[in-house]
Image (cartoon, rainbow, N blue to C red):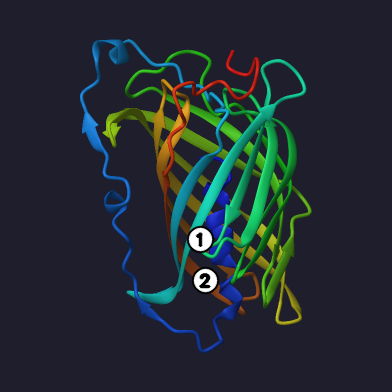
Amino acid sequence: MKLRLFVLPLLALSLSACASLSLRRSKIVFMDPKSILPYEPDEPTDEEKGGVLLRLKPSRNALTYEDAIQIFAQIEKDTAIPLEMNKRRTVTYAEGDKPGVFKSVVETFNDDGTKLGEEGFMETPRGGIVRFLKGELESKSGKVTILSHAREAIFPVKKVRIGDKWSYEETLRTKVQGTWISKTSSVPTRIKVYCRLLGFAVLNGRRCAVIAVKTDSKGVEDYSAFWRKYSVRVGIYAKEKILFDYKRGVELGNVVRGETNSVAVNGDFSDYSKSISVSKLVDDVGSGGNEGAKGASR
């Protein structure tokens, strides 16, 4: 959930200006998410049939996630330019500057321990961003800097039952800097996100709510590529499946699939890319689950 829905397609887009380079192409074969997140759907309990309350409960311990990412850019029939990444993220919490708010810091690392980026914001238990602090992510294909980021609460006020739907909106302004392409948003992009409670499942002995998330964003962006400026029509579609331990208030894992279609207005270049990211929690949040930020779990 949150930033990953938008950042993955942006990383794929940074490859679009490389169409004339002799980059290796391969068959498009995506990983099997179940090999990383072997969750099993389960019938709802009587309590769950009455609805569950979705809330973040910051832990006193840092949470560690492993992310497996695949991006296929410049898709032509069944081949594309592949990009694979394995990342590790740590999420740490601190007490906020007012009751009901906590600070979240997400640090991203490469396999060798190199720090690639950091996101920071003040948020509420319902997942709304009260104040954005910073956001950047760097890879071999380029760097994405989040210049501004606002988000409504991602969880409803009341309990939700299977089939219930809700939505929220995010706005962000980004700067993309790649080897051959660069872009700075002059106007924040608005992203409408739609959610639905699919059901319940068990992952490694832990019960979780399964939440489906999707978004669709279209617009025209101004890019610089090959020392020229281009106006590019960009369409980004992403969908995500989240496994959320609603009792402890922590995400156990997620699968994000994204598609990006970009075409220069003058027709000089275009790109169609697909991506997938599978994330899993690799440590335990402990027995408290909500002991990290005083007053934040209300």
Q: Earlier in the sequence, mark 2 or mark 1?
A: 1
Q: At 61% from the left edge and 62% from the top edge, which residue is drawn? A: 114
Contact check, label 2 and label 1, Cβ < 8 Å? yes
Residue 41, numbered circle:
none
The residue under label 1 is which amino acid type?
Answer: Thr
Q: Which mark is residue 260?
A: 1
Q: Residue at x 51, y 22 (%)?
A: 55
Comparing 284 with 72, the one in front is 284
**Distance of mark 2 from mark 1, alpha carbons?**
8 Å
Q: Residues within 10 Å of mark 2 (few under 14, many from 20)?
A: many
The x, y position of residue 253, in whole percent, is 41, 41
Q: Quickly name the residue at label 2.
A: 271
Residue 275 position in % (x across, y down):
44, 60
> In the structure shown, which secondary structural element does the residue marked by tag 1 occupy?
strand
Q: Is residue 226 left or right of residue 82?
A: right
* 94 is higher (above) or lower (below) than 149: above
Q: Is residue 77 visible?
A: no
Amino acid at dot 2:
Asp
Q: Which residue is situated farthest in the bottom direction here?
A: 22
Locate the C terminus by quadrant. top right
Residue 191 location, x and y as percent? Answer: 60, 42
Question: Is 191 left or right of 72, judged from the image as shown?
Answer: right
| Residue 47 lies in quadrant | top left
Vertical side of 24 occupied by 191: above or below: above
